[in-house]
Amino acid sequence: MHRQFLCCAATVCAILLGWINVSQADVKLPAIFTDHMVLQQGQKNRVWGQAAAGEKVTVSIGTQQHAATADAAGKWMVTLDPLPVSRDPATLTIKGNNTVTISDVLVGEVWICSGQSNMQWSVNQANDPDLERLTANYPQIRLISVPQVGTQEPQDDFNGSWSVCSGDTVGDFSAVGYFFG
């Protein structure tokens, strides 16, 4: 009897600890939302992520503030009102049980460069990559590379982050995207 009580008590404790961990889950964002990101100007922009089920999440940028509640699967999404183009860096703040701050956010044009293998051709592979590295001082140009992953299922996230165009980073930029920009 004593052993059954201990097993039952241990099970209840494990369930409660698991519930506490889930209910205190941190707000998490996919890799598309990182420092140095660019939001499309003049359009509504969606911001989404994960949190504990039922957790209220608030997203703010500039004078805008929007809230959502995470669904049973922990997913949430807000839609930002259209923003005007701005070269002045903004901060995107996401608050729930924790706070995520995304710095140096620009609002401008977002171009998606995709398609054939020539998009993977880097500036390092272009003619005169040393010259390009010496002259690449374009802090308004940003890049995020999405790795090729073969899958039959839609993906919620990927491994990547935004880069600011500089002599140190331009070598890894898509040459086609860089010279087009």
Image (cartoon, rainbow, N blue to C red):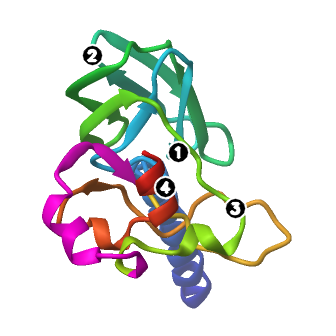
Identify the residue position indicated by label 2 in the image. Answer: 62
Kindly identify the amino acid type of the residue bearing the numbered disc 4. Gly
| Distance Cα–Cα, label 3 vs label 2 | 30 Å
Q: Could you give the CA–CA distance between mark 1 and mark 2, rounded to whole angstroms?
A: 20 Å
Question: Element under label 1?
Answer: strand
Any mark on residue 155, and which? 3
Report how far apart the C-alphas of labels 1 and 4 lie in the structure: 28 Å
Tell me if label 4 and label 3 are in contact, CB under 8 Å: no
Q: Real-space Cα distance between discs 1 and 3? A: 13 Å
Identify which amino acid the numbered label 2 is placed on: Gly
Q: Is residue 145 left or right of residue 77?
A: left
Residues 77 and 53: in front is 77
**Along the viewing direction, whichever of 170 and 64 lies nearer the viewer:** 170
Question: Which residue is depicted at the point 69% across and 61% down?
Answer: 155
Q: Earlier in the sequence, mark 1 or mark 3?
A: 1
Question: Counting residues from the N terminus, which is met first, the one under dot 3 or under dot 2?
Answer: 2
Task: For the N terminus, give its image quadrant.
Answer: bottom right
Part of the protein shown in magenta: 125-143
**What residue does disc 4 label?**
177
- In the depicted structure, whether residue 123 falls above or below residue 181: below
Badge 4, how many Cα within 10 Å: few under 14, some, many 20+?
some
